[in-house]
Image: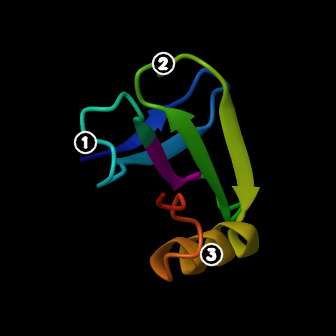
Amino acid sequence: MATAGRSTSTGLPVAWHVSTRSDNGDGNCVEAGPVLDGSRRYAVRDSKDRTGPILIYPDTTWSRFLVEVRAGRLDAPTA
């Protein structure tokens, strides 16, 4: 679910999207989305604390992160 244009506690407009992995019931809830100011940055926050800290990444770093996630290289090891 996106909330396009909603300002963050820092005043940045972000089109937030809830991670598809956030609804697994373990309390890990993440939202991310592009900052809508033309800066080509992406914001990440804890969706349980929407007024809390926000991490900001340049688009190249965010794109690389997504490649690694989709390839499964960041999955937790199984015992």
Q: Amino acid at mark 2?
A: Asp
Which numbered disc, 2 or 1, marks the residue that appears first in the sequence? 1
Q: Position of residue 27 (x, y in %)?
A: 37, 27
Q: Which mark is residue 63?
A: 3
**10 Å neighbourhood of mark 2: few (<14), some, or many (≥20)?**
few
Which residues are drawn in magenta?
Answer: 31-36
Looking at the image, which residue is at 33% across and 32% down? Answer: 26
Q: Residue farthest to the front? A: 79
Q: Nearer the viewer, mark 1 or mark 3?
A: 1
**10 Å neighbourhood of mark 1: few (<14), some, or many (≥20)?**
few
Query: Label 1 belongs to which residue?
Result: 24
Say how the picture is coloured: rainbow
Query: Would you say 41 lies left or right of 70 here?
Result: right
Q: Amino acid at mark 3?
A: Ser
Q: Secondary structure at mark 2?
A: loop
Does 33 appear in magenta?
yes
Q: Position of residue 45 (x, y in %)?
A: 55, 35
Does residue 5 lie above or below 74 as drawn? above
